[in-house]
Amino acid sequence: MIQFTDKTLPNGLRVLIHEDESTQLAAVNLVYNVGARDEEQDKTGFAHLFEHLMFGGSEHIPDYDAIAQAMGAENNAFTNNDITNYYLSFPAYNLESALWLESDRMKALTLNSRSLEVQRSVVIEEFKQRYLNQPYGNVWHLLRELCYKEHPYQWPTIGKNIKHIEDATLEDVQHFFDTYYRPNNAVLTVAGNVKTYQVLNLVERWFSDIEPGEPVVKSFPKESEQTRARTHYHYAEVPADMIVMAWHVPPRVHQGYYVADLLSDLLGRGKSARLTQALVKEQAIFSNIHAYVTGDIDTGLLVIQGTLLPEINMGFAEQAIHQELKKLQDELITEKELNKIRNQLEAQKVFGETSVLNIAMNLGFAALLGNPQLVNTEIQYYQAITPQDLQLAAKRILASHRTNTLYYFSKSKNA
Amino acid sequence: MINRRQAPLITTPDTLELRNPEQAALACGAPIFMFEAGNQEVSRIDFVFDAGSWHQSRPLVASFTNKMLQEGTTALTPAQIADRLDYHGAYLQLDCSADYASLSLYCLNKHLDDILPVFLSLMQDPVFPERELSRLAGREKQAYMVNREKVSFQARRHFNRLLFGQDHPYGASADAEDFDFITERADLLKAFFETHYKQAPLCVMISGKDTEGTCDRLMTLCEDWEVSDNPQTAAFFTPKGTGEQRLMIPHPGAIQHAIRVGKTTIGKTHPDYQELKLINTLLGGYFGSRLMANIREDKGYTYGINSSVTTYRHDAVFVVGTEVGAAYSEATVKEILKETGRLCTEPVPTDELNRVAQYLSGVLLSEFDGPFALADRYRDAFLFGLDFDYYRDFFHLLRRAEPLRLMHLAQTYLSPDTLKVVIVG
């Protein structure tokens, strides 16, 4: 059970505090409710580019990293389709410095063309390193485009293409900051060897003079229900064929999400999971196969992704996956298998709670979803799922007319 | 109104408080170290064997022996092993490097009674089934085929070969044919197991909560574990670098080049090593390093660049690594050599040195946070005949490092004309 205090400052900043005396560290996590889904479709990659600019200094702290390093902090940030998350982990007695750093860049980030030019160039190299110069690096570009026709999840966080990053202007950047980087659009979590009352005092000291912004109204085009199967064929210079299949799953806070997550666990969690046992170990069709849900706030995806062994043809591999899915649709799973998944989830939760940074991130995201208590109660949603629920979800979610399939062919193998 | 220009006071820890681990031993003689910490009822147990690729006669034998430990025992099929572990939410991690091989178990304490016997059977009674071996080889070969498309993989490989030569365990790497060869050679794995896993483990680490209780259980379960008394003899290899100073490996279609710049150097037990570590941190060992500031934050050539000093059992390597836009690779190498040269000719400014010392002091606390981290750090020291004093010494060094001495050490160990360069792209 994670104990925490939950307060909201008058300017709208939500603050969560969790005490843990077993560590000498503290973690500060600041999550902004903005991600790639908030971008316009001709200006993609922007939320992530902006994350880089957040390290360029603020009005009273020209060098963010120098302070973070002096206080002995490990710090970084990540952006996904929904959120932008900043975090520091450091010796607990330096808490005030962490709050000074985060409050100053929320209050008055320094935006200039020099910083924009350099980070633009860094992000372009990141684009190349992670997406263009890696075998299968563009899988998510292709898959998102295939699965989403309306919702902005149709592009990945890095952006649709390098051109959008090249075109970003200082005005765009300033506008983005003014719109989204406001206290009323953020959740601050402090976890570790701290005292709640002290944290509250310090947070009020450093954050309460920051002006709130206009409330951000989120209205994304809803992805229409898929009525027929979609496919995409791609050929690239890769050594082996790959198949990626994806189905829409309910939004993150929907009960149906948890059922979908459990379905993906049955298929792909651990070495004993169904797809691994049947298709990697027994039938030797894939060299590896994974199943997981994306966990997006809006309609997400359940993904199955497998790399085919050299002598296997694509149609055969696809059939083999469908057969495993059919078993889930036709037969109730046993209590024993369900217990296995429950035990795995319990272990994952307990091991996850060994890190205060992890706790801070989870609390922040749960608050952003609307309820920080989710860190304690979500496990009950999973425990309540029955074999019947799973069978029903397998039929509904994994229906053949809702399937999106990306056939990623090796050019040389299929020459 | 708060004065935002007034920075809050930053505190740097003045001591590194580390409690030495409790110790015990298995009947076979293996030392056990216990790291009691944290709030959660969890454990991690590591067994480390002297079974790295240093001892193998053919490529892949050591790593495949290690991987195959979970592919069937006298009592359990691979599927049963996977099922038993997963059913209890337990998680297994197998590792094999040039020097060591290990098995680690992550488990909730309440399931230890069910899982410990299974875990131990993996290292005591594996059977190396042929079907599993050939399938593993097929999968690993394919993973290798994918990896070799990556410029970073090729750069690492060619750099190690350049330093040590292909016949040295630290310079050798497997090729596609090696995976085909190993497919039908379960006999080699069995022989490797007989020689290198039937020795007492080098050490056993227990970390988490109730480590003493777990230790008692392990000792009881291992009472009858028979190991060989014959001392293990290891072949000795001399590094035979290829002698080239600079290597350019073409990689058609690459839009980024992977770069490695470095050399062999002194290891953990050398008296100058900790200062070399400090110099390395200044150069490329953290986000604010000189290489990051210059090549990423000033020039924007790369998403990331770093340098490291890695100690092997019989050698050590200093290396700078990065991936940069194809047009920037020559300029990047030039800057790397310039920054290394600057360490040899200019004393580090005091404020920069203080900042790095402050950073490392704070980060040391994180590096010892929680039971698993404690076990990791201790193991890193113990395998070189050291203990927590090694880190306490480093902590003190951070307070008395001298710019002039660091400059002289840089001249001794990092002189730019001694560095070898590999570019793939």
Image: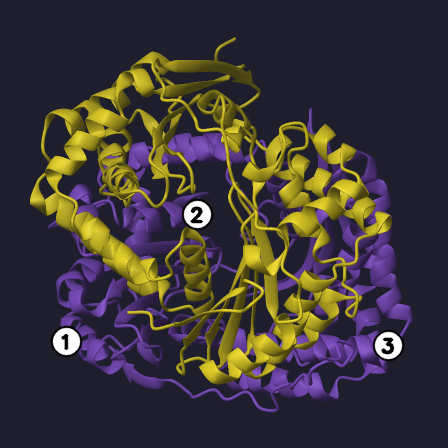
Residue at (87%, 69%) from the top-left corner?
A: B344
Residue at 27% in and 50% down:
B69
Q: As rendered, which of A394 and A308 lies closer to the eye?
A: A394
Secondary structure beneath label 1: helix
- Colouring rule applied to residues: by chain
Chain given the colour purple: B
Q: Is B398 in front, or is A206? A: A206
How far is disc 1 from disc 3 in space, using C-alphas?
57 Å
Q: Is residue A375 above or below residue A172?
A: below
Say which residue appears at 38% left-offset and 29% top-offset: A306
* Residue B67 sits above or below residue A268 on the image: below
Chain of the residue under label 2: B
**Amino acid at circle 1:** Thr
Q: Give SS at disc 2.
A: loop
Task: Write down the residue under mark 3.
Answer: B349
Sequence-earlier tag: 1 or 3: 1
Crowd band around label 2 with a 10 angstrom C-alpha radius: few (<14), some (14–19), many (20+)? few
For marks 2 and 3 on the same chain, the one whose residue lies earlier in the sequence: 2
Instruction: Find chain A in the image and tell me its colour.
Output: yellow
Q: Amino acid at mark 3?
A: Pro
Q: CA distance from mark 2 to mark 3?
A: 50 Å
Kindly identify which numbered label has been placed on residue A163: none
Which residue matches tag 1? B220
Q: Amino acid at mark 2?
A: Ser
- Where is mark 2, residue-wise? B57
Q: In the depicted view, which residue is nearer to us: B189 or A254?
A: A254
Q: Identify the image quadrant of residue B51.
A: bottom left
Both marks 2 and 1 on one chain: yes
Residue neighbourhood size for the residue with mark 3, other residues' Cα within 10 Å, grouped as few (<14), some (14–19), many (≥20): few
Residue B327 % position (x, y): 82, 35
